[in-house]
Amino acid sequence: MTMYLRHQIDVSVSRRGVIRRRDFLRGIAAASVAAGTLSWRDMVALHARELQQRGMSMILLWMAGGPSQFETFSPKPGHENGGETTAIDTSVAGIQISDNFPHVAKMMHEAALIRSMTSKEGSHPRASYLMHTGYLPTANVKYPAFGSIIAQQHPRAELDLPAFVRIGSGRDGSGGGLLGVEYDPFVMPVAGQLPTNAAPTTSTPRYTRRLDLLSRLESENAAAGAAFEVDEHQKLYKKASRMIMSSQMKAFDLEQEPAAMREAYGDSQFGLGCLLSRRLVESGVPCIEVTLGGWDTHNDNWPRVKALAGQVDQPLAALIADLKQRGMLESTLVVWMGEFGRTPRINPRAGRDHYPRAFNVLLAGGGIQGGQVIGSTDESGTEVADRPVEPTDLLQTFCKSLKIDPKFENIAPNGRPIKLVDGGTPVDELFA
Amino acid sequence: MNVTSVFSHLLAAFLVAMALLHTAAIAGEMGAAAVAQRADALLAEEQFGGDAQTQAASAASDEIFFRRLSLDLIGAPPSPEAVTAFSLDPSPDKRAKSVERLLADERFGQNWARYWRDVIMFRRSEDRGLIAARAAEQYLTDAFNNNKPWDQIARDFITATGDVQQAGTTAIVMAQNGNSEDVTAEVSRIFMGIQIQCAQCHDHPTDRWKREQFHELAAFFPRIAVRPVRQDGRQRSFEVVSVDRGPKNKKNNNVRRGSLEHFMPDLDKPEEIGKQMEPVFFVGNQKLDSGKTDQERRGAVADWITARENEWFSKAFVNRMWSEMVGRGFYEPVDDIGPDRDCAAPKSLEYLADRFAANKYDVKWLMQTIALTDAYARRSASRVDDGSAPFAAACPQRLRGDQLYNALVGVLEIDDPSEDGQRGYRNLFSGPRGQVNATFGYDPSVRRDEVAGSIPQALFLMNSPQLARAINAGQQSTALGKLVAETLDDEAVVGELYLRCFAREPKAAEMRTCLAHVRTSTDRAEAFEDILWALLNSTEFLNRK
């Protein structure tokens, strides 16, 4: 029964148009008659879920390598572990962050910090996978990245663009996983250009003619024992052509932004990625991930983090301000995080090593109450002193913000039901 | 020459003669053709009420058969010359002859090496496991071309040690980063098709294997470690080593890691070390004393896994190869078989697996046998769950990344840059072949009708500048440019393109459609670019029927 319902939901939202929705209602009615279990209210509830989620999006700013908590949002200026980093005041009385983030400091009233993130995974790939999926990697089940989960749970009938876009050259093991290639991230190596292979190599009339020739020749093959394959193939080609011919492709063109706006986000590649993600959210893309690598500062921590923070500070603040100004912040969850933090003790190469035991995350929008700090570490920054938050708790929090049911189960190829998030509880205090 | 050496030569000659006699005896009993025939008869009994003639699809045409066979055995479609020669060959045994010829082709080993590389690497738990991919491909290419028996290949992988960029057999261990439980699961899945790791945390509800049995199997693998190999102070590679003296590195606060024995965690007290497990092989219940070395443990379990008494070893391989070639497995998915799973035609599989084992796990023999069955030669039909019997028709299958790349290189006559000397994590997905693999590759252990196409695939074939250059007919340097310039007869050009792309001639309707397109285009060269574009973007090109 659950399977049947899920199928109906998928059908109802899979394609544009009213006809499908009517099919959906008819399907539900038939099912309820057959099973005698579904009331009108159930149907409305099913429908409401879709309505409720409409418009929720997430922008993940992924700091690959593991950013130092001390040099970002959990400075310890009074302690030897804090190093040379100083703390600055923010727009919220009582909250101080590192002096590497003066722009973010001015937006602190819109953002919340978790200073008590904790996990056990200290290797880059495993920790990245854990933070992206909520699970550790295994050989048997490929867990989907949270972005793919959003794409699955927030289907948008009117969207011609891919539902999960990853910007930047970050290479991460997670993707659609058991949800299938349909939910893999669509990778944009560089913001400010068209996606790879998205522009036809011929004029539009000739391109249309080619597609027409293709579909006529395909019908021969369909008749010769490949009807299913041809049908699937044609659907895929329609989807791909619809995407590249869509007016929504304008979202990728950053030249359409006024110069002042581009300036506000800064001219770094990461800044362009942030600007692009706002444009994509506006076009209806429910999940965008922008990667900035280089945070693995085993040596020369201070100059390196300063340079990295310099690329993040202005665009992150601009993104929050821009979303706010457009009235999109409430429906867009912005998350800044990496796979783990860095050792409190400074190593002989003036660096910090991997440290999953205590690190931090910044969140804004998506119903998060800004201007607050969750949890804390002890004076030396070695241990979480208060309110530990584990990766699954964080993913539960994302679910709560995005109105996704974490108990929803997908079925792995080996038949095992897999919850979107297994265990953990949302950090309720974050929501006002 | 002294007496001893004369004697040893005589002895050698005698042994060779005995071996030849033995082979001849086997050939009499177990020739591929005879076994194929018997398998077809069993299949007809099990699936078609004894009447495959009326209940199953008829044989595919020569052209379709030949493209299928070529893609299956050597991973590339046939050249236009080969198709023409095959079609015109009047001899009644030309299919059997072409099977033998393709099995002897060097590309046979490479094709199946890439297949198994994907089987292993698509389940890697970390990307750094990819570092072993090329060496694995190299080892397997040689093994398949030299027809190394499957049990010996399995043993090499199960017992492997060494630098992962030299010893390709370390790939399974490296892909799982040396984690003994994951290696256990993969060895069972790959060589026996049994997903015993489902019992890792609890007794499986639909399986007979108990949680203890998984952990007893894992007790064969606790002494494996993956370590960095340094040279001049820089990390150059990884190596798989046996650690028989403790303690191994302790990592991540995990009490069980770093021990020389395997411990089964207590589910109620996961923070405690749990119960120490003795190595026991779950299929035949063979036991090993505790305290044995890594090589003793892995050697013993390799013996027991590959023993003739273990039916799952031969069944897993036969089922997989059958599924690859016929398009559908007896068990599905191919890596989830066992006594509590449904088998589409148990007697047929039993028979083939038994012959495969009796034939000393001869891989080429098995491929030849399957290729000679009627089941393999049938027309294909889309796989739809309409209740029709499995194997009534062959199933179309999407080309794997490497097969597609080979097809593109062949059709477009573009140079395939040498891949020699490339190492490291990323190189598997770099270069033109790597890009195609990254975009079109899929896990070969999943059911073929569950492998879906993706938007980046469509965009690559439709719009990639590389392909646009390669089909530019205005350039004499491209295959199409030459063809269009040298052949003034439009019909002949269309015929040649179909032969290249689909290994067959166009049907009358297709010819009409193409010629009409040429007539209504302003530029002849552009018209043929459009046609080639359409053929490369078609379902038929991307699949083997």
Image (cartoon, rainbow, N blue to C red):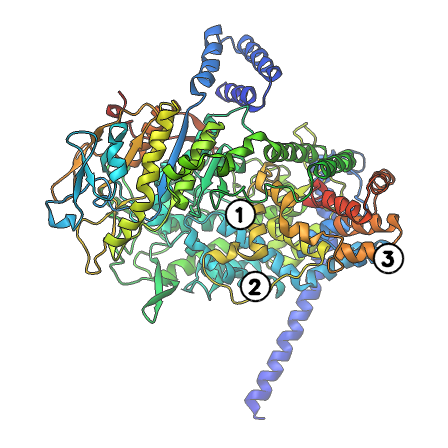
x, y percentage for residue A393? Answer: 29, 31
Instruction: Using the image, name the chain to which the residue with label 1 belongs.
Output: B
Does B1 appear above or below A386? below
- Disc number lying in front (3 or 2): 2
Nearer to us in this view, A187 or A2: A187
- The quadrant the C terminus of chain B occupies is top right
User: In the image, which is nearer the foreground, mark 1 or mark 2?
Assistant: 2
Return the residue at label 3. B89
Mark 2: amino acid: Glu
Q: Mark 1 points at which residue?
A: B312
Residue B50 in sight: no
Give how far across and how far down residue B54 sits, in percent.
Answer: 80, 34
Q: Which amino acid does label 1 sit on?
A: Trp
The residue lying at 60 percent from left, 61 percent from top is B144
Residue at screen point 31% across, 69% down: B233
Cα distance, mark 1 to mark 2? 36 Å
- Sequence-wise first label, 3 or 2: 3
Quadrant location of the N terminus of chain B?
Answer: bottom right
Q: Residues within 10 Å of mark 3 (few under 14, many from 20)?
A: few
Tell me whether the residue at label 3 lies in contact with that at label 1, contact meaning CB atoms closer than 8 angstroms.
no
Residue under label 2: B419
Question: Which residue occupies the foreground of this view, A284 or B213?
Answer: A284
Q: Residues within 10 Å of mark 2 (few under 14, many from 20)?
A: some
Neighbor class of circle 1 (other Cα within 10 Å; few <14, some 14-19, many 20+) is many
Q: What residue type is labelled 3?
A: Asp
